[in-house]
C-alpha cells in the first residue's frame, strides 16, 4: 500500500543532516505478510483499498501538513509552542513523537505503532516493512524482524 504526506520537522541534534525547521513530502510504502488463513476471500493478504484508505486517513488527521517534533526535547517543544501560540486561527497541527522525527524513526513509528493498531484482529496481516520515499528514492526503511514467517 502507498500513501503520501507533507510535514515540517525539527531534529534536535547538532550533527543531524537536516538542521533547523524545514519540510518534506514523502511517500509511505508498506508491505504486509499473513498466514494463508488470514487471506481475504479473493486470496489477498489484505484489502489494499481499505488499508490504503486507513493509512491515508491516519496521515491526513495526524501528520499531513503538521509539525512533527520530539515530545521530551526542550528546544523542539519550544518551537511547537511558538507555532501554536502564533496561530490566531488555531489551525496549526502539531504531533509529538516518542522518538526524534528522523525519517528512520517515522518509518519505525508507522511500522510499530500506527499500522499494527489499524489491523488489530487475530488473523490480521503483520506489517513486514515500511519504506519512506522522497522524489522516488527510498530514504529510510523499517523492517519488522519479529514478523513470523507464514
Image (cartoon, helix red, strand yellow):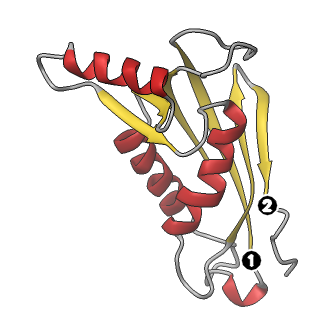
Residue at 21 percent across and 13 percent down: it is 86
Residue at 72 percent across and 90 percent down: it is 37
Residue 56 placement (x, y as % from top left)? 46, 46
User: Quick one: which residue is furthest to the front in this view?
Assistant: 74
Q: Which mark, residue 144?
A: 2
Is the residue 135 above or below the residue 49 in the image? above
- How would you rate the neighbour count of disc 2 (Cα within 10 Å): few for under 14, some for 14-19, many for 20 or more? some
Quadrant hosting residue 116: bottom right
Residue 71 in view, yes or no: yes
Q: Which mark, residue 74?
A: none
Residue 89 placement (x, y as % from top left)? 12, 20
Residue at 53 percent across and 57 percent down: it is 114
Q: Nearer the viewer, residue 21 or 77?
A: 77
Which of pointers 1 and 2 lies earlier in the amino acid sequence?
A: 1
Residue at 68 percent across and 81 percent down: it is 39
Of badges 1 and 2, nearer the viewer stands 2
As helix, strand or loop, the secondary structure at mark 1 comes to loop
Find disc 1 in the rendering and name its residue. 34
Residue 1 in view, yes or no: no
- How would you rate the neighbour count of disc 1 (Cα within 10 Å): few for under 14, some for 14-19, many for 20 or more? many
As helix, strand or loop, the secondary structure at mark 2 comes to loop
- As drawn, is 33 to the left or to the right of 80? right
Is the residue 116 above or below the residue 24 in the image? below
User: Quick one: which residue is furthest to the left in this view?
Assistant: 88
Quadrant hosting residue 148: bottom right
Is the residue 53 above or below the residue 62 in the image? below
Residue 127 placement (x, y as % from top left)? 70, 63
In space, the residues marked 1 and 2 are separated at their CA atoms by 13 Å
Q: Quadrant of the C terminus?
A: bottom right
Amino acid at each position: 500500500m502507498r500513501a503520501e504526506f507533507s510535514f515540517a520537522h525539527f531534529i534536535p541534534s547538532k550533527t543531524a543532516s537536516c538542521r533547523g525547521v524545514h519540510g518534506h513530502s514523502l511517500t509511505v510504502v508498506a508491505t504486509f505478510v499473513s498466514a494463508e488463513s488470514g487471506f481475504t476471500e479473493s486470496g489477498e493478504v489484505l484489502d489494499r483499498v481499505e488499508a490504503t484508505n486507513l493509512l491515508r486517513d491516519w496521515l491526513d488527521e495526524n501528520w499531513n501538513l503538521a509539525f512533527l517534533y520530539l515530545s521530551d526535547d526542550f528546544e523542539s517543544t519550544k518551537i511547537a509552542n511558538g507555532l501554536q501560540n502564533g496561530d490566531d486561527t488555531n489551525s496549526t497541527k502539531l504531533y509529538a513523537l516518542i522518538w526524534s522525527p528522523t525519517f528512520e524513526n517515522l518509518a519505525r513509528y508507522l511500522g510499530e505503532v500506527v499500522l499494527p493498531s489499524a489491523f488489530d484482529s487475530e488473523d490480521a496481516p503483520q506489517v513486514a516493512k515500511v519504506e519512506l520515499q522522497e522524489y522516488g528514492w527510498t530514504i529510510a526503511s523499517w523492517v519488522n524482524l519479529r514478523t513470523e514467517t507464514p
